[in-house]
Amino acid sequence: MSDNINIIVVKRDGKKVEFNGAKVAVAIKKGFDSIKKDNEDSKYTEKDTYKVYNLVIEEIRNKKEDRIKIEEIQDIIEDILKNEGYNDVYESFSTYRERRNYSRQVFFDEKKQHKFLKAIENLGLEANSEDDGRTAMGSMLSYGQTLSKEFSKSYLIKRKYVEAHESREIYIHEIDYYPMGTTTCCHIDLEKLYTDGFSTGDGYFREPNSIMTYETLASISIQANQNDQHGGQSIPALDYYFAPGVIKTFKKEFRQTLHDFLDYTEYGIFAAVNRNGKRNR
């Protein structure tokens, strides 16, 4: 089916452009690609994308109008995805569309834009305050956290939860770290690291053989994990994890002490004289 349609598309800002079927195809493909998990083959093929695309083109052509709003095209895509049974793609497409709409409100709605700019303005006043005492990197972090917070509310969190957060019905803890994709705090299981060894990216550590190495690797694991996420790092049951290291060190020290004792008392040099009068080593 030909996608040549003589129709004008009215964009959100009122600007009028010629219909471009390629952009519609890209939007549909992104919807299908969005549900594909890492390292997994998608359950949909290009045939599914073409099927939805052709149905969308047919629906637009059947309208027999000389212009169409971009929101109408998106509505048609959603309706066809839902009617054809692509429910997961429909949910993904609809959610992304909702987030984009909310982000436009954040940055273009006068009231919300004023709120956002006010937060940035306050940061600037704080950064220039002589009594602030904050470093340049500290000020930059504050700017980044403010932008990250708005990005989270615009693109990553459903609008109903954002509205509940802003109306103080709920509180989303450390929303500025939401784009990082990590938990806030975590417990570190040292038992597995000590048994199998672990890698920090720069090098590999084998199973430790002394309590000193156990302690060193515990510190390294905390530091390595801290680089990958924010929040507190905790090692529960530290004495339980360190116990094998204590035993290993005890055995090593006991053997060394016994060897030193035998060497000091000359048992390690002279042996009993056997019946033939020969010395045994």
Image (cartoon, helix red, strand yellow):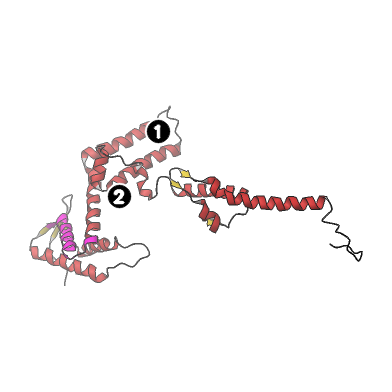
Identify the residue at horizontal 54%, vertical 48% (top origin): 240
Q: Is residue 152 left or right of residue 91?
A: right
Quadrant where the image shows the N terminus: bottom left
Check the image and name the residue furthest to the top.
131
- 58 and 40: which one is in front? 40
Q: Position of residue 92 (x, y in %)?
A: 25, 57
Identify the residue at horizontal 27%, vertical 61% (top origin): 30
Disc 2 residue type (three-letter): Leu
Q: Which residue is mark 2?
A: 156
- Residue 213 appears in the rendering: no
At mark 1, the secondary structure is helix
At mark 2, the secondary structure is helix
Q: Position of residue 176 (x, y in %)?
A: 35, 43
Quadrant where the image shows the C terminus: bottom right
Location of residue 48 (image quadrant)? bottom left
Q: Is residue 206 left or right of residue 6?
A: right
Q: Which residue is mark 1?
A: 127
Q: 10 Å neighbourhood of mark 1: few (<14), some, or many (≥20)? A: many
- Specify start and end residues of the magenta stretch as a single range: 68-88
Q: Position of residue 17 (x, y in %)?
A: 17, 57
Q: Position of residue 65 (x, y in %)?
A: 8, 61
Q: Is the magenta region chiefly helix, strand or loop? A: helix
**Mark 2 / mark 1, whichever is N-terminal:** 1
- Residue 263 appears in the rendering: yes
Disc 1 residue type (three-letter): Ala
Q: 10 Å neighbourhood of mark 2: few (<14), some, or many (≥20)? A: some
